[in-house]
Amino acid sequence: MIRSVFRGSGSALPVRVVPNAKLAETVDTSDEWIVERTGIRQRYIAGEGETTASLAIEASRAALADAGMDAAEIDLIILATATPDNTFPATATKVQAALGCTGGIAFDVQAVCSGFLYALATADSLLKTGMATRALVIGAETFSRILDWEDRTTCVLFGDGAGAMVLEAEEGEESDRGLITSRLHADGAQHDLLYVDGGPSTTQTVGHLRMRGPEVFRHAVVNLASVLREVIEDAGISAEDIDWVVPHQANARILDATARKLGLPAEKVIVTVDSHANTSAASVPLAFDTARRDGRIQDGSLVMFEAMGGGFTWGASLMRL
Ligand code: ACO
């Protein structure tokens, strides 16, 4: 049996930090409201010269260094993003060229905030079938560029960043290291609750993010609890066996409510939404890398990843490091 085994991770953030108080200077909001309703205290916003590709490249270099691997050894790059540098080609190919990878497969995955879960499961499938042997799986976004900065109900929620993970195909049944199982879902009927009102084929513009927040919130708690149960059942474990949950960082209240539904103690949930805000597809690998670098997540940890986003799309993966 082939397993996709974790080798290293990295992340990147823009230089500029924007605290809640700064946003309160331009829209009718307050630090108190944002902290109480979301848990967000600040976000990083890309400046001139910082793009989805540049953040992805920095995160990927850090992940390769952590894995002790050369870019030339990578034969699969999957980049999850809803904010690519260009409509085409895929931002993954820009990353491939910048890293100096000379061959293999490179493409983008578009599942908004669940993008990293979709990319991870896709990489796992390609490694398992022998299509590739070493994968770089990236989540990278510059959501600041699709926000309506006059809409206080959305502009306070998001930030920019990138996270990356290196996986390698490994033969053998003795150890349970690697990606154990994944579950993905989509429900296109919920399009109007969370979407961008532009695109190349409709308006020929990039458009702005539109969200009916409270309705998304309700769906998120139900869908996430349900997919987490599926993965727990499929893996034949119980919730207590999980060492760490690395959730999509949309709202501290969603993280609390989901953990409560599963009976998971809050101390096992990695929370970075306070400092990164919602970085869409970047949020899971960014939170994961943060918790590895500060020593919480260690080799041997059983880690659950989960996310829900526009589409709707949602998913979860269980991995033994
Ligand atoms: N500052 C001050 N007041 C505000 C702000 C703001 N930034 N935004 C909204 N309000 C007001 C509203 O106008 C409303 O006022 P009213 O009562 O006078 O009408 C009041 O605050 C309450 O607003 P709600 O929208 O009901 O607030 P809620 O507690 O639901 O929080 C939030 C809103 C934070 C958006 C929450 O619903 C949420 O997190 N939703 C889920 C987001 C999510 O998970 N997205 C998924 C992934 S994103 C992706 O895929 C791209």
Image (tube, rainbow, N blue to C red):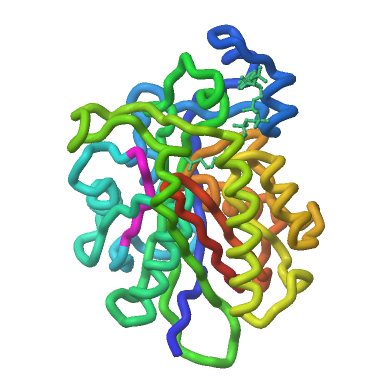
Q: Horizontal placement of 75 versus 204: left or right?
A: right
Q: Which quadrant of the frame does ligand 1 lie within?
A: top right
Q: Quadrant of residue 27?
A: top right
In the foreground, 11 or 68: 11
Expressed as whole percent of the image width and height from the top left, the position of residue 178 reads 54, 75
Residue 60 visible in rendering: no
Expressed as whole percent of the image width and height from the top left, the position of residue 193 reads 47, 38
Residue 48 visible in rendering: yes
In the foreground, 100 or 117: 117
The residue at 40%/34% (across/down) is: 142
**Vertical placement of 287 versus 225: above or below?**
above
The residue at 63%/14% (across/down) is: 29
**Vertical placement of 32 versus 201: above or below?**
above
Expressed as whole percent of the image width and height from the top left, the position of residue 147 reads 43, 25
**Vertical placement of 80 versus 161: above or below?**
below
Q: Horizontal placement of 130 versus 34: left or right?
A: left
In the foreground, 93 or 196: 196
The residue at 19%/46% (across/down) is: 89
Q: Is residue 228 magenta?
A: no
Q: Residue furthest top?
A: 25
Q: Which residues are magenta?
A: 77-83
**Vertical placement of 286 versus 167: above or below?**
above
Q: How many marks?
A: 0
Expressed as whole percent of the image width and height from the top left, the position of residue 111 reads 40, 51
Q: Quadrant of residue 237?
A: bottom right
